[in-house]
Amino acid sequence: MALAQVRCPDCNGLNVVKYGKQPNGEQRYSCQDPRCERTIFLLNYRAQPLAPSMRTQIIELALDGADATEISQSLKLSESDVLTIFQQLSRFSAPPVGVRPRKNQPAKVAAG
Ligand SMILES: [Zn+2]
């Protein structure tokens, strides 16, 4: 019988231990991998966090100007998953859900 295994959202490693709880009762975890920069994290609602590579793809598509619907179709994710990543990535200045990322950044890499 297998318990749900907790993977670190950064290194995707299984070297993870429980690390107390948030004030709201959410379980915290600590990654024990010495190479991993993310030492403490939460699972949120997700049993299996998105792989870092998937996050990277979401970021790249978003920087290309794709919206959440286009990204979810492209990566075969649910749109809510994509929006969740958007929110996690933009916690410093969270845009309203569903708002298309602004394309006001200068392109550093030529397309093609
Ligand atoms: Zn880790």
Image: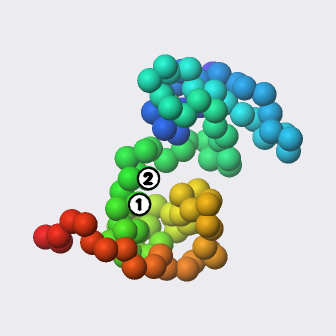
Q: Is residue 17 visible?
A: yes
Q: Nearer the viewer, residue 11 or 63?
A: 63
Q: Is residue 55 above or below residue 99?
A: above
Res. 24 image quadrant: top right
Amino acid bearing label 1: Ile
Q: Residue at x 64, y 37 (%)?
A: 41
Q: Position of residue 83 (x, y in %)?
A: 56, 66
Mark 2 neighbour density, 10 Å: few (under 14) some (14–19) many (20 or more) = some
Amino acid bearing label 2: Arg
Label placed on residue 81: none
Q: Quadrant of the N terminus?
A: top right
Label placed on residue 58: 1
Mark 1 neighbour density, 10 Å: few (under 14) some (14–19) many (20 or more) = many
Q: Position of residue 80 (x, y in %)?
A: 57, 65
CB of mark 1 near ligand 1 (< 8 Å): no
Q: Residue at x 75, y 35 (%)?
A: 27
- Asked which secondary structure carries label 1, the reply is helix
Colour setup of the view: rainbow
Q: Position of residue 22 (x, y in %)?
A: 80, 39
In the image, is 15 to the left or to the right of 104?
A: right
In the image, is 13 to the left or to the right of 44?
A: left
Contact, CB < 8 Å: mark 2 with mark 1?
yes
Q: Position of residue 61 (x, y in %)?
A: 35, 66
- The residue at which mark 2 appears reads as 55
In the image, is 71 to the left or to the right of 33?
A: left
